[in-house]
Amino acid sequence: MAGPGGFVRKVITQDVIPAAATIAAGRLTDQNPYVKALAGFLAGGVGAAMSGPSSAEKLIRAKIPASVTEQDINRAGQLIEHAQTRGVALTWPEALSRVTGQPVLTDTQRILESHAQTRPHMQEFFADRPAQIEQAARREFDNIGTVSPQPSNIGPQAASAAEDTITAVRAAINRATRPSYDAAGQTLVPQAVHAQAMADPLFARTLHEVRNNPELSAYLHAHSDRSVAVYDAVKQQLEQRSRNLAQPTNPDASQVGSSITGSLATEVRGAALDASRNAAHGPTHYERALGEQTRLREQYLNPLLHGPLGKLADAPDTKRAINALFQSSPLPGSQQEVATAVRAIVARRPAVAEQLVRAHAEMVFNEAARELQGGANQFAGAKFAKDIAGNSQQRENLRAAIEALPNGAARWQGFEHLLDIMAATGTRQPKGSLTAFNQLEVQSMSTGGLQELASKGISPGKWMSFANDTFKAWTLGRNLDQIARIITDPRSGDALRQIVRIPPGSDRALVMAGRLIALGSATTTEQRTKAANQ
């Protein structure tokens, strides 16, 4: 009488009906005490189940951690709704576990997926999960960029754009230091030193290349071949050739040739410095020019050469270009370098930048979504989220790359929502072995029905035990069905918000849980009606 529920309802269901059942059973069986007791027990048990909250309600309240707040329910509901807009159905345990960062009802969901009573319902709910994840991912990739008709050309095109950027930075540094080089160009290398240099075929050939370079001819036209400015241009040409010969991907690569060329560049630089020092007292114009070059290169050029942009410039194929931007174990704080590299490509070939980022995301997803031996991968979304943004730096670098694209902030917002949905699917626990549940099923199939009733008839003292076991089995099945409907119904949020306001174990919590059960049942009935009408 002190429990939750209406007084009149409890009097009828737990007093009047059981009493009537006992009287009727007594009249039909010559007042058999066992039959009368059984009739009253069953009628009263069913009435109690109908008039008050069942163990399902207590389980829901007990299984929700006390730290879960109404705000967590709201956030989980928003995640479920957003997933629905993308065609992905999430359970409440998945959404709550994602937004709170702790398991919430996940063990309960695992049991529901394994138990014979609720397994069909849960299998039906998750049957389309792989296809839902696939469609949601592909649509989001379309928001990043188009599919390249020639994906093998993405890498070379990105490398070309990166090299153009590096060349532009070099040109800007040269323009900034040109006044000092012009002043240094008035100094001439001694005739004897120059004659010795011209005796080297490599020097003579490089000088000829410098004189015929359209970008340098106008600048060096007024300078003698012995000018310090011309010697510096020869030095730079030799240094570039030395770097090219050292590249393993260069078909003409030669470590010996790189070493010889680099040594000659050092000798030419020394000759220019000696000539400048002999012609001036104190710091020379050439020394100042070299100092300015060094400072500007260290500040602007070297970070590009050593970072993702420099690696992109050396990338001969698309996979290497992707690896240059997106590493599985990126350096801490490397997101700015990634953003700089992507912005540089966007400035010259925006479509290539979009296709490069999309290719990375799609390659990771294709690998994560491989079908397993048992069929489609139910956890493909979770694996994708882990592989593409498994640690905080990976996520920051991915964000930097996407935000560097045109309209990047909006693109990242959509992709981040996708990652949240994918990660939520990973909070689901694998249902594991069904051995224990299979044993229960075999047991249930080998007993019960008229045969079981007949065996009890010869031993009336076992009727109470049989009735109790039967009622427990009925209650368990009823509770599991109710809980399965609740955790898969996106409209259970209102009742869940009311439940978390109340301390666990209180009568008000049980009453509110009862309303939750009713809501779940009503929603399921409404859905079935709509499906039948359709």
Image (tube, rainbow, N blue to C red):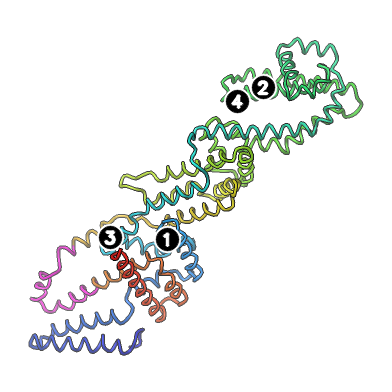
For this rendering, which residue is in front, 421 or 106? 421
Give the mark, 2 or 3, whose residue is nearer the N terminus.
Answer: 3
Q: Could you say which is closer to the camera, residue 12 or residue 1?
A: 12
What residue type is disc 2 on? Answer: Arg
Q: What residue type is labelled 4?
A: Gln
- Give the CA distance from mark 2 to mark 3: 70 Å
Magenta highlight range: 443-472
Quarter of the image holding residue 482?
Answer: bottom left
Q: Residue 47: where, in percent of width, then height? A: 26, 82
**Measured Cα–Cα span from mark 4 to mark 3:** 61 Å
The tag earlier along the polypeptide, 4 or 3, is: 3
* Figure check: 314 above or below 26: above
Is the stretch drawn in magenta largely helix, strand or loop? helix
Q: What amino acid is at disc 3?
A: Pro
Q: Which of marks 1 and 4 is nearer the N terminus?
A: 1
Picture residue at 37% right of the left edge, 77% below the top: 515
Residue underneath mark 2: 241
How many numbered discs, if any? Answer: 4
- Pair 4/3: label in front: 3
In percent of the image, x 29 and y 66: which residue is there?
Answer: 533
Identify the residue shown where x is 30% and y is 63%: 534
Q: Is mark 3 on a helix, strand or loop?
A: helix
In the image, residue 383 lies at what x, y percent? 43, 49
Residues at marks 1 and 4, CA–CA distance in whole angstroms: 50 Å
Q: Residues within 10 Å of mark 4 (few under 14, many from 20)?
A: some
Amino acid beneath label 1? Glu
For marks 1 and 2 on the same chain, the one whose residue lies earlier in the sequence: 1
Q: Distance between the residues labelled 1 and 2?
A: 58 Å
According to the picture, the residue beneath numbered tag 3 turns out to be 120
